[in-house]
Image (cartoon, rainbow, N blue to C red):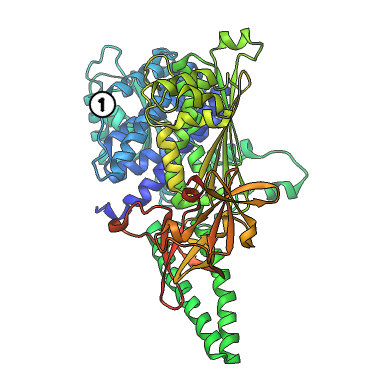
Amino acid sequence: MDTDQYIEVFLDESREHLQAINDHLLRLEKLPTEIDIVQEIFRSAHTLKGMSATMGFEDIASLTHQMENVLDKIRHHELTVTTEVIDISFLATEALEEMVQSISEGNDGKKDVSELVMRLKQVESGTSSQEQVQSNASDPKAFQTLELDEYQSTVMSQAKENGHQAFQITVQLNSDCILKGPRAYMVFDQLEDLGEVIKTVPEVDVIEEGNFEQAFTILYITTKSSNSIKDAIERVSEIHKVDIHDFSLEKREVEKSVEKVQPSNNEKQTESEKPKLSKTIRVNIERIDNLMNLFEEVIIDRSRLEDLSKKYKDQEFIETVENLTRVTEDMQGLMLAMRMVPIEQVFNRFPRMVRDLSKDLHKNIALEIYGSDTELDRTVIDEIGDPLVHLIRNSLDHGIESPEKRLQAGKPEEGRITLKAYHSGNHVFIDIEDDGAGINREKVEQKAIENGLISSEQARNLTDEEVYHMIFASGFSTADQISDISGRGVGLDVVKNKIESLGGSIVVQSEPGKGSKFSIQLPLTLSILSTLLVKVQSETYAIPLSSIIETVTLEYKDINYVHGQKVMDFRGHIVPLVSLSNVYGISDEDESSNSAVIIQTGDKRTGLLVDSFIGQREVVLKSLGNYLKNVFAISGATILGDGEVCLIIDPNALVKK
């Protein structure tokens, strides 16, 4: 079977099931007696095993199969949840994630999982004896406790209607039998011509490999009598005992339904507990991107029509264009909503990461997550994961103290990291806060002076925030020794560069002894922007509205000079003025610039001097391409309604200037 057409569906569903396993393992570690959690993990592992076996990824199938065996014993109270069980389950999940990632990169997804499988087998056999296995296998009711899936139940029902009988057969080998796998294969060979095997315990491949104790159970349908079946099996040597019992599907269904019925007089509550049908569909992300590109062309043509309607001043034409504008604005909202993705899929990786690193660092740390349903543009979601990983690792290693130091400082032994996301205006804010020791200003200053970033005199005049921001410098680290987690001076500079490349900013706050807080500000979307068009001599520029505080008209008396820099008094604050004409080399003269756009990034403000304001316009952000990389203070370009190319200003760069 050609499975290439299903690979994307396999990858999507595999990632979902692996995330579910991760989440439920974390819950199980805190609630080790909750069998319902084990059931959820078992379902995900079982589904993943089936999918991978169908697709031909045998290493994934074998590892999930062994995980199933361990989980099956836990849910049947034959094994208890211990730290060892949780640890090996996490290691197995990590290996599965690596294999799925390998497949997504076009590889075969193969990995040597023999050691993990062996460890899982050791865990599985740790609390079960041979006698328990034999007694369970020979118990006529043992098979009844296991569930048949829908397909198996359907086959059983159809077989009954066609006059077949269903038998539960337990075959027990001699205690001195060495070649258990071949003997079991010979049993199946005897049964092959007399009927059909529906299910085995354990599964067929495990039985034929000999990975069972001395007994196994078969659910079998046939037209032959039980004596004929028994005689056929006993022809195989080294068979100690054969037990055959009628298997009643109807009785099993009655028992199953009795177990599920909950006495309640509230019928409305019963209705509310029914699972709701999903109202979502999977769409390839490339299709959404293509649809977005087409819609961006519609936005450009809409601008062209708006200009034409003003030019010709035909009432019907104007009304039609106005209606088109309203409809496309609604479409734009829907299109952007389609691109919005909950940040939960980024946050989901962190509980497991915090757990593992806490153990490596010998610290007791809890992670609290808020606002995981906050939505962000898919483009931003794809890029923001790594910066958050660096910041959380920084809080784990540098921020949170050891349990001993926390107790000495009068703090709880358990440290806390809070990850929070929320909307504010046209931005999304992500806060990473810890209750650790905070940033040591003196240590940062000393390291910055050693690295030549600042002088001793400059250090005395810097604010705390300016000093704290130096930790984002390339090659900067205050770690006393290099470890696997930190100390090499890489990480936070990458964080700063990545966030700024997304049009965002990061602010650091810290209080010695109390903790630190990193606040990230990101734009909601990167494709369609609301901008203010301005004129600078013959050139038109677009300034994102999200960065604009106010527009003002200036007179010469309103402009002052401080150390040769033009400034203005804006509501009691001194704001530096930057001439766009000078910045972009249009002209060396800026006396004609009598208008200013006040922009703000973080807590810093700057006034941009322009000739005039054109008005607000929705524009499509397009990259300048490989030939025009790293143009100062330009984030991209757009095409206006009259066909003119308009550059889009990057406010972050101008505020820094």
Q: Residue at x 27, y 52 (%)?
A: 3
In percent of width and height, residue 332 lies at: 53, 67
Residue 181 is at least partly visible in this image:
yes
Going by the image, does 614 lie left or right of 58?
A: right
Which residue is found at the position 40% from the left and 26% from the top? 476
Instruction: Please tell me which residue lies in front, 383 or 274.
Output: 383
Which element is circle 1 on?
loop
Q: Quadrant of residue 136?
A: top left
Considering only vertical position in the picture, is 600 above or below 286? above
Q: Which residue is mark 1?
A: 209
Q: Position of residue 584 (x, y in %)?
A: 41, 59
Q: Quadrant of residue 621?
A: bottom left
**Residue 526 or 236: which is nearer the viewer?**
526
In the rendered image, residue 512, in percent from the top left (x then y), is placed at 61, 20
The image position of residue 454, as x and y in percent, is 44, 27
Residue at 25% of width from left, 41% of height from top?
193
Residue under the point 31% across and 36% down:
99
Which amino acid type is marked by label 1?
Glu
**Residue furthest right in the image:** 265
